[in-house]
Image (cartoon, rainbow, N blue to C red):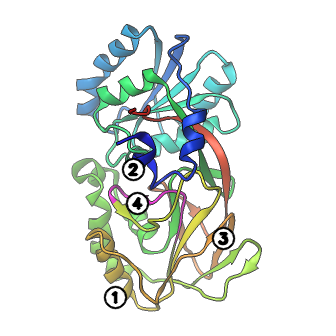
């Protein structure tokens, strides 16, 4: 299958993509690899030296930086982009690491490469990138790129989606230890074991400057169709259409929301009267009481939040055409 066919679910400008695609192979340069050493320590131990050797064999100089804590990757990515010494910055970790790197390079002319060293690697799945580290590294050396949109929530950027409601509550309740032991299923465990203390709030929306007539107990704003791995909340979302897709669950029933959650897990459609799917460039979310929201799998803050799309904000390395 050609590239256009493989990416058609997530990109709307495939013909333009093929024309704009370009290669780094004409000139070898320096790569900055920002590594989260806590994401998958065993995988890093097995693959890191092989990855560096592969880059070196292709003629690239690699500088590796191991992050020290939350937010560290953002500052290092920003300084890397400002320096002008590197043509590509590589996020080696999970979606949280990718999110931090993106927040550091917005507004700068630098390519983004991705290595699958995290738990879910949702952005890589969305972009149909290889989930084997050495294959992903080989793809980076080929250097074909495509510009994608990102979202911005109260000034902070996200690649995939934000949401508020039960899932943000579950993420807030999930311990780092649980994530290390059972990976993405830690969120499901936290959500189920803490269900008794969850109190849903009504969330109001303003879409492109206009008050939306309905409220809900769960809202997701998606830049990409993938959610938490192989699941989909907004199957029509595309990462280059200049819009954000919205899923609003307007039901008052927690049981109904859990029913929808299990349908998502089972990969069944959510076409019901209690789910609404508008699209927009700017959304305001508000609620009474304390309502956290998450973006790309991490808690970003509490409502109210202003969410907007930033078109073609990141030049990301993708798979080359196959024909």
Categorize mark 3 by other alpha carbons within 10 Å: few (<14), some (14-19), many (20+). Answer: many
Categorize mark 2 by other alpha carbons within 10 Å: few (<14), some (14-19), many (20+). Answer: many
Looking at the rendering, in which quadrant would you find the N terminus? Answer: top left
Residue 194 showing in the rendered view: no
Closest to the observer, 267 or 254 = 267
Residue position marked by numbered label 2 in the rendering: 122
- For residue 304, the mark is 3
Q: Earlier in the sequence, mark 3 or mark 1?
A: 1
Tell me what residue is drawn at x 38 percent, y 44 percent. 128
**How far apart, in angstroms, are the residues tagged by discs 4 and 3?**
22 Å
Residue position marked by numbered label 1 in the rendering: 255
Tell me what residue is drawn at x 77 percent, y 73 percent. 209
Residue 25 lies, in percent from the top left, at 50, 15
Residue position marked by numbered label 4 in the rendering: 227
**How far apart, in angstroms, are the residues tagged by discs 4 and 1?**
21 Å
Q: Quadrant of residue 129?
A: top left
Work out which residue is located at the far right of the displayed protein and give it: 209
- For residue 144, the mark is none
User: Of helix, strand and loop, which one carries label 4?
Assistant: strand
User: Of helix, strand and loop, which one carries label 1?
Assistant: helix
| Residue 228 magenta-highlighted | yes
Residue 274 showing in the rendered view: yes
Q: Which residues are magenta?
A: 220-230
In the image, residue 12 sits, relative to residue 100, either above or below, namely: below
Q: Earlier in the sequence, mark 3 or mark 2?
A: 2
Q: Are marks 4 and 2 in contact (CB under 8 Å)?
A: yes
Q: Earlier in the sequence, mark 4 or mark 3?
A: 4
User: Of helix, strand and loop, which one carries label 3?
Assistant: loop
């Amino acid at each position: 299958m050609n590239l256009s066919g493989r990416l058609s679910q997530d990109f709307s400008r495939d013909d333009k993509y093929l024309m704009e695609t370009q290669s780094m192979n004409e000139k070898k340069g320096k790569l900055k690899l920002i590594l989260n050493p806590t994401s998958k320590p065993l995988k890093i131990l097995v693959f890191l030296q092989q990855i560096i050797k592969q880059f070196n064999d292709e003629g690239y100089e690699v500088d590796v930086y191991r992050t020290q804590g939350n937010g560290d990757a953002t500052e290092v990515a920003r300084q890397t982009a400002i320096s002008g010494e590197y043509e590509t910055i590589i996020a080696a970790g999970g979606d949280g690491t990718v999110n931090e790197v993106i927040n550091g390079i917005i507004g700068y002319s630098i390519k983004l490469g991705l290595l699958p060293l995290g738990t879910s690697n949702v952005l890589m799945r969305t972009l149909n990138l290889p989930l084997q580290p050495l294959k992903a590294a080989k793809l980076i050396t080929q250097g074909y790129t495509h510009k994608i949109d990102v979202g911005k929530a109260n000034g902070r950027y996200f690649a995939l989606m934000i949401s508020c409601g039960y899932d943000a509550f579950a993420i807030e309740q999930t311990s780092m230890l649980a994530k290390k032991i059972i990976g993405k299923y830690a969120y499901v465990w936290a959500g189920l074991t803490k269900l008794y203390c969850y109190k849903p709030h009504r969330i109001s929306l303003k879409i492109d400057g206009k008050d939306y007539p309905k409220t809900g107990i769960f809202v997701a704003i998606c830049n990409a169709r993938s959610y938490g791995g192989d699941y989909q909340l907004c199957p029509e979302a595309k990462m280059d259409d200049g819009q954000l897709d919205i899923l609003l669950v307007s039901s008052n029933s927690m049981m109904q929301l859990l029913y929808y959650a299990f349908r998502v897990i089972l990969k069944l459609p959510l076409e019901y009267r209690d789910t609404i799917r508008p699209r927009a460039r700017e959304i305001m979310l508000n609620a009474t009481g304390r309502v956290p929201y998450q973006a790309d799998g991490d808690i970003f803050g509490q409502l109210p939040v202003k969410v907007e799309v930033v078109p073609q904000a990141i030049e990301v390395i993708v798979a080359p055409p196959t024909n």
